[in-house]
Image: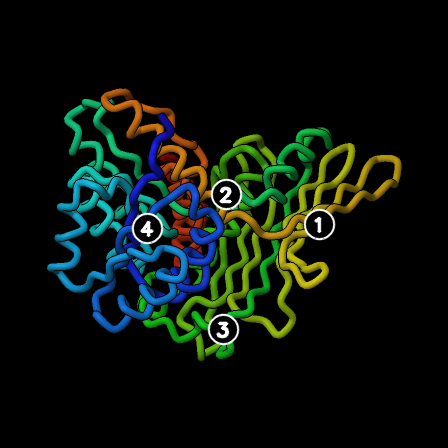
């Protein structure tokens, strides 16, 4: 007998929910039933509900503490997407996990290493070492699911010993960007550097296939329309011994986003771009015999990560009592490791470039 699609709820009704989650879920509506959408205010819950209802006709709008409690106590809701302000996401996720829901939490995994450590110990304590009862806590890092990074990782393994890695991020966080006036990001430790930066670190870690061991960074605050810091320049050393540079500007007049891995026998480059009106990445392989091969991959990471989460929670419902091997790229620990790298860079920046070892989760 075919299994009914899992019923889920969304906690949060902000920009990303309306512009990404609802349209992407609509594309895979055969795999999921959206039962409820929650926001702190009735107005925003109803606005998001209106968009959702075009595809999920029976979606319920919930708001405030009572609405949240209704989602927590609804036995039909097996999974919850949490997309809230960075300062409160972890607490809300833990409440839902404790109540027996699987959670896909929007990045960043936490606001700092210490918050991530505390959160993980709370999460593990819910299950008293009974890992079979453990609910899935996933972090929505779409870069780990972008075909461009999945394919580039394979190419990196073909270019011989790694010699150097360069990551250059010139962002476009100006007043025309819908997230520019987001108050929680402005009051967030690390500002936009942490919220945006976890994506670029995820891309770096995915590409090189090993962890960042230590960093030495300089941070500054130049654009006063942005919260500090708004630039970071960091040296980093990978566990494989290779070193690299990570340069990020939150806002530049000439946006550019590029990762480049140079090996003994070639170079792999991933650059944000567009083709025929589609946004995505151009992946280029430069070979030892001077050949260049470029492929364009449109964005599809959000859809892919949602499919992976839905597949995991469906399997978990079928295999009650058995711990399932959830998709590793979604694990909370992966998200926490992205935060750990940036946290180390920000700490080094505050210590005038002192070498900081990256916490390993």
Q: Quadrant of the C terminus?
A: top left
* Disc number lying in front (1 or 4): 4
In the figure, 273 relative to 202: above or below? below
Percent position (x, y) of residue 314?
A: 35, 33
Looking at the image, which is closer to me, 215 or 275? 275
Secondary element at tag 3: loop
Q: Say the numbered circle drawn on residue 330.
A: none
**Left or right side of 172 for 29:** left
Residue named by callout 4: 34
* Disc number lying in front (2 or 4): 4
Secondary element at tag 1: strand
Residue named by callout 1: 296
Q: Quadrant of residue 14?
A: bottom left
Q: What is the CA distance from the residue labelled 3 to the residue labelled 1?
A: 25 Å
Residue named by callout 3: 177
Residue named by callout 2: 304
User: Does residue 190 appear anywhere in the picture?
Assistant: no
Q: What is the CA distance from the residue labelled 1 to the residue labelled 4?
A: 32 Å
């Amino acid at each position: 007998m075919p299994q009914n699609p899992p019923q889920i709820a969304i906690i949060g009704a902000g920009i990303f929910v309306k512009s990404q989650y609802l349209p992407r879920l609509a594309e895979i509506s055969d795999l999921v039933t959206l039962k409820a959408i929650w926001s702190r205010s009735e107005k925003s819950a109803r606005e998001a509900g209106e968009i959702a209802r075009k595809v999920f006709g029976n979606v319920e709008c919930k708001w405030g503490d009572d609405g949240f409690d209704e989602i927590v106590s609804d036995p039909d809701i097996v999974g919850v997407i949490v997309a809230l302000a960075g300062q409160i996401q972890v607490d809300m996720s833990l409440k839902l996990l404790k109540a027996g829901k699987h959670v896909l939490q929007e990045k960043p995994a936490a606001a700092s290493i210490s918050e991530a450590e505390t959160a993980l110990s709370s999460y593990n304590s819910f299950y008293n070492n009974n890992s079979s009862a453990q609910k899935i806590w996933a972090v929505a890092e779409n870069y780990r699911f972008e075909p461009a990074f999945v394919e580039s990782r394979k190419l990196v393994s073909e270019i011989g010993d790694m010699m150097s890695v360069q990551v250059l991020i010139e962002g476009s966080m100006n007043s025309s960007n819908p997230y520019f006036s987001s108050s929680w990001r402005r009051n967030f430790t690390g500002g936009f550097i942490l919220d945006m930066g976890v994506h670029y670190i995820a891309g770096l870690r995915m590409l090189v296939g090993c962890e960042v061991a230590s960093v030495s960074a300089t941070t500054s605050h130049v654009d006063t329309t942005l919260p500090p810091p708004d630039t970071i320049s960091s040296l980093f050393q990978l566990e494989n011994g290779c070193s690299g540079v990570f340069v990020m500007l939150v806002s530049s007049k000439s946006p550019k986003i590029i990762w480049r891995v140079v090996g003994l026998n070639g170079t792999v480059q991933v650059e944000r771009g567009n083709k025929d009106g589609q946004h995505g990445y151009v992946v280029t392989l430069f070979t030892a015999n001077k050949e260049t091969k470029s492929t364009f991959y449109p964005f599809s990471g959000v859809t892919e990560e949602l499919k992976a989460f839905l597949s995991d929670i469906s399997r978990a419902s079928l295999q009650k009592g058995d711990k399932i091997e959830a998709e590793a790229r979604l694990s909370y620990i992966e998200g926490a490791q992205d935060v750990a790298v940036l946290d180390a860079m920000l700490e080094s920046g505050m210590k005038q470039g002192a070498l900081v070892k990256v916490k390993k989760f």
